[in-house]
Amino acid sequence: MNEAAVEDVDVGGALERLFDLAVVLGDLMHHRLQQLGLTPARAEVLWLLNRVGPLTQRQLSQMLKCTPRNVTGLVDALEAAGFVTRKPHPTDRRAILVTLTQHGHAVASGWSAEHRQGADQLFGDISAADLATFAAVLDQVLTRVRDHTTATPHANQPS
């Protein structure tokens, strides 16, 4: 794209729409999780266990990049709500495996179906060419954001 074409593009407007999309998607996600009595952090544990299978709390801590204490709180809450159980590790008597209950598995599996349904609603009538362009631009934006966030240390890391 030449410089004149770049000047005609409303980059500020594009950024506004991107922020608007993030807010709308975030609100939808939080509303759905709230209906299930979950927080984003607890949902991430369920999603991970559904994808990977039973894990020790140490493994969860490493994969989620948070403290063991934080994982203990997440697992305590998920266990109290009936989403996970703690079971002795079959080969390491010092370790405890965190495993999805039937309820936890049903909820996490349901998200996959909701994900497909949401994708169909959002993109079902968009041409393959437009969708490919959209995805390519999103990939570029995400790469830039990720490169910037890894290059810039943050004072307050999320827990």
Image (tube, rainbow, N blue to C red):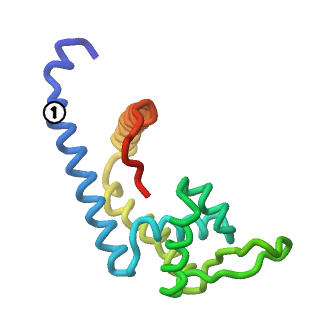
Mark 1 Cα within 10 Å, few/some/many (few <14, many 20+)? few
**Quarter holding residue 114:** bottom left
Identity of the residue furthest to the right in this view? 91
Residue 13 seen in this snapshot: yes
**Quarter holding residue 147:** top left
Q: Amino acid at mark 1?
A: Gly
Residue 141 to residue 83: above or below: above
The residue pinned by badge 1 equals 12
**Which quarter of the rendered picture does the N terminus lie within?**
top left
SS class of the residue under badge 1? helix
- Depth check: 3 or 51 in front? 51
Residue 150 to residue 40: above or below: above
Residue at horizontal 37 percent and vertical 36 percent from the top: 145
Please give the count of numbered marks on the rendered protein.
1
Residue 136 seen in this snapshot: no
- Depth check: 12 or 157 in front? 157
Please provide percent x and percent y for residue 69. 55, 66
Residue at horizontal 39 percent and vertical 60 percent from the top: 119
**Quarter holding residue 148:** top left
Residue at horizontal 51 percent and vertical 65 percent from the top: 70
